[in-house]
Amino acid sequence: MSASDVSACATPQTGDLAAPRHVAIIMDGNGRWAKRRGLQRTAGHREGVAAARRTVEAVRDLGIEYLTLYSFSTENWRRPAGEVRDLMGLLKQFIVDDLPRLKEEGVRVRIIGDKENLSSDLKALVHRAESETADNTKNTLQIAFNYGGRDELVRAVRAAAEAAIRGDIKPEDIDETLFARYLDTHGAPDPDLVIRTSGEMRTSNFLNWQAAYAEYVFVNALWPDFNADILAEAIAEYHARERRYGGVGGA
């Protein structure tokens, strides 16, 4: 059942139910949105940024503490060089244009993913966004950029192994809690709800560790068309489910 099928039986609002603490979104469909309109893929990506802005505002209004947006994956480097440059440029522009407003609204910004092979100017902007919002506490926006779940796990294993070699930790002390400290998302709660747009039904190497017990909702809307009503429908479906975490349900 997708969120688009829920609208007939659920009001697009959370009502008296508590909002999920952490919502993560696989933003998919920018290229198809542009193609259907006879536009270049870049136009779809730009509209996708507008959808991201709407979503940040909707999350704030709903009282959701954490929002993670899957913006650029480690696999996206395989796209044409021009499109990759455009995507890099959009992140730069987003930081430059939106950072003042995000700071004013109390949003903490984190960029998760492998930052090592980003350009020096993009690294500087990422550092600026994170440092200037580090003390904000209203909610947290995590942008997954040059991110891949498997890559994150490999980097975390490597970091834990190096810590063990240095004698900072003992291998026998490594458990889920300790290991999570080496993930890009350390300090953030695991997502309660993962939404994927565009009708595709796969996880695409996103938050492989963190989303182990998340509820997934797949919506048919392409990402540039995503809005507060679609988000609310997805949350309504989330509330309709029983989260058992491997245990026995109450019904």
Image: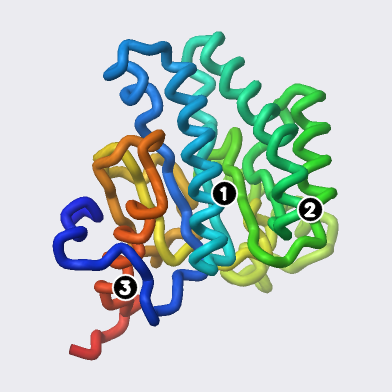
Residue located beneath label 2 in the image: 133
Q: Which residue is rendered at x = 84% and y = 49% of the image?
A: 132
In the shown orientation, is residue 129 left or right of residue 203? right
Viewer-side residue, 105 vs 146: 105
- How many residues crowd around disc 1 within 10 Å: few (fewer than 14), some, or many (20 or more)? some
Residue located beneath label 1 in the image: 153
Q: Where is residue 124 in the image (x, y as percent from the top left)?
A: 83, 32
Q: What residue type is labelled 2?
A: Thr
> Badges 3 and 1: C-beta atoms under 8 Å apart?
no
In the shown orientation, is residue 129 left or right of residue 222? right
Q: Which residue is rendered at x = 30% and y = 67% of the image?
A: 236
Q: What residue type is labelled 1?
A: Leu
- The answer to which of marks 3 and 1 sits earlier in the sequence is 1
Viewer-side residue, 133 vs 200: 133
Q: In which quarter of the image is residue 74?
A: top right
Q: Where is residue 51 in the image (x, y as percent from the top left)?
A: 47, 39
Q: Which residue is rendered at x = 25% and y = 86% of the image?
A: 248
Viewer-side residue, 73 vs 66: 66
Give the secondary structure at mark 1. Answer: helix
Give the secondary structure at mark 3. Answer: helix
- Checking the image for residue 239, the label placed there is 3
How far is disc 3 from disc 1 in space, using C-alphas?
Answer: 30 Å
Q: Which residue is rendered at x = 66% and y = 61% of the image?
A: 186
Give the secondary structure at mark 2. Answer: loop
Q: In which quarter of the image is residue 160?
A: bottom right
Q: Which amino acid does label 3 sit on?
A: His
- The answer to which of marks 2 and 3 sits earlier in the sequence is 2
